[in-house]
Amino acid sequence: MRLKLVFPPPAGPTYLPLGIAYLNAVALRNGVEIGVFDANIELWNHICSNDGVFNALRNFCHAPSEIFFRQDIYSRHFQHMPEVRQQLEKLEDMAKIYLEKDELSPELEQLLFRHGMRINFGIPETVAFSVMYPAQLTFVLAQAKYLSRSGADFKMIIGGAAMSAFEPLELLETFSFIDAIFTGEGEIPFELYLKGVEYSGIPGCFYRDGQGTVQCSGRSQYVKQLSEVAVPDFSCFEMYLYFNPVPVMPMLGNRGCQWRRCSFCVHNNSFGPHRARQPADVVREMQELREVYGCRHFYFADQYVAPAFLDALSDAIISAKFDCAFQIMARTIREYTPALLEKASAAGCRWISWGLESGSAKLLEIMNKGTRPAESFEVIKSAHAAGISNLLMMIFGAPGSNQSCLEDTLSFLSKIYPYADSMTASAFVLFENTAFSRNAAGYGLEILGRHVAYEVNGHKIHSNKLRFKRAGEYGNGESSLAIEEIAQWERRKVWIGESSFVSQLCCEHYLLYVDSMKSGTPFNTLKKGA
């Protein structure tokens, strides 16, 4: 089978597509050699190649450590990153216009033609697009439409975690050039497709039957034992194309969330139940990546690394005497003891992204976070004392919030800020199939309708976002509380103190910087062809 896997824009230029690496491993295990095209990194490199300032930014990302870790030089180059992103956003807007109004701009046509040539190389029988972020679907649909009109003679399939954010039935009924959509975790449907199984026999597959009617093969399935999943294979990527001075690679130790109770969370719709790998297997994979790619920096893409897993992982790393630096996501619960955090730091944990969400005990209870502000403060302070960088992930405008709740959060942040290096301030979004949306009225919310992602010839394609307002809010417009709360935080933040330099960095560079601050370990730059 001649198959081409495509990772579309937009995503960051530092990101190695983990999902593609997993699927590449499935193909190799089945003796099928496939083609891989990272259209996202191609676009980033193309934009930078055509502008001297942007090209200098890209070149800086491959600089030796004595230059890369100069904060003044970093800031001088990365002040231009918003301009690069604006070009991507402009192309995304053009792609949506092409989908909805059939107007193809010259700039977008150049992109679709260039990527189409790369996709067509090798004359594939199937092109499979892996969509990790909802915004990527716009580029995928535009590319597929362009390929179809150019006479493409291959099947086009869409899969990936972000497909849980859309209604496959609406997509297939609107876009006739898409042959099938795979939902759920990718390994099982992808392997069955490689083996020649018909769409009707692939779990979680939406497709058209012989009469053109959209059908669903049934619920998606997931791999119950992660030991059965092929280790991701990154050999399909050219490392020097990515905007990192050395490899920074994604890892998975768990799938699904062990907590799974947060009232706002929609991520459980993308994965099966919680399953954990053996920490020793995770460390072996990290060691192999070190041997093959010289990688010692890893960030865990797990939704949540529980204390017990972090403890066992740290033991395995220390026992193996493996030199590494890594990042995880966690909840601020007391089981992250000072002793555990000290051990994790000794094993190489340099940064934890904490799902803090709020400093209000009332809101944390409504969100069902299972955390308390006082305990959260002690956990974050202990992580800081252990030499671990803290990133706080906050949600503003949550159901039940009022000025008193906001003051609790702002007061908490003022107290915790000296122990944190970075913070994200996210506006609350209401999603389908969450505790908040299932009992919207009980949480004081009025659902106004589903969010329309695309509208083509009278056909509406909805995302899983819901438009809403709160009890007591007038008019038909959506609630503005989250925006108002974030604005209050921005005003308060000015008086708390300056943010750490790393707060402006992308994930991979953040890890490199905090590791350098902790260990002072220099690195050799990645040479072309490595």
Image (cartoon, rainbow, N blue to C red):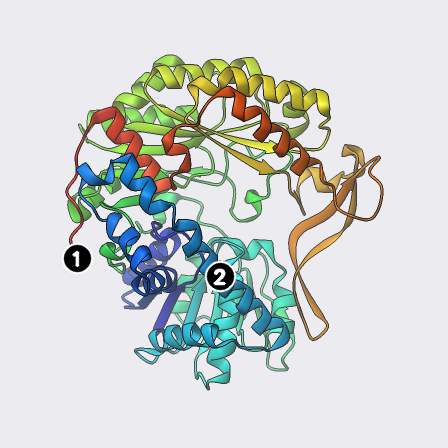
The answer to whether residue 105 shows anywhere in this view is: yes
Of 430 and 23, which appears nearest the observer?
A: 430
Tell whether 428 sits left or right of 238: right
Q: Residue at x 32, y 43 (%)?
A: 76
> Relative to 455, does residue 338 appear above or below in the rendering?
above
* Amino acid type at image mark 1: Lys
The percent position of residue 411, horizontal first and vertical second, equals: 59, 17
* Amino acid type at image mark 2: Gly
Q: Tag 2 or tag 1, which sits nearer the N-term?
A: 2
State the mark number for residue 159. 2
The percent position of residue 262, horizontal first and vertical second, equals: 60, 33
Of 490 and 171, which appears nearest the observer?
A: 490
Q: Residue at x 56, y 35 (%)?
A: 260
Q: Residue at x 53, y 69 (%)?
A: 141
Query: Mark 2: few, some, or many residues within 10 Å (few <14, many ≥20)?
Result: many
Between the C-alphas of marks 1 and 2, the distance is 31 Å
> Relative to 378, does residue 442 appear above or below in the rendering?
below
The percent position of residue 195, horizontal first and vertical second, equals: 38, 69
State the mark number for residue 528. 1
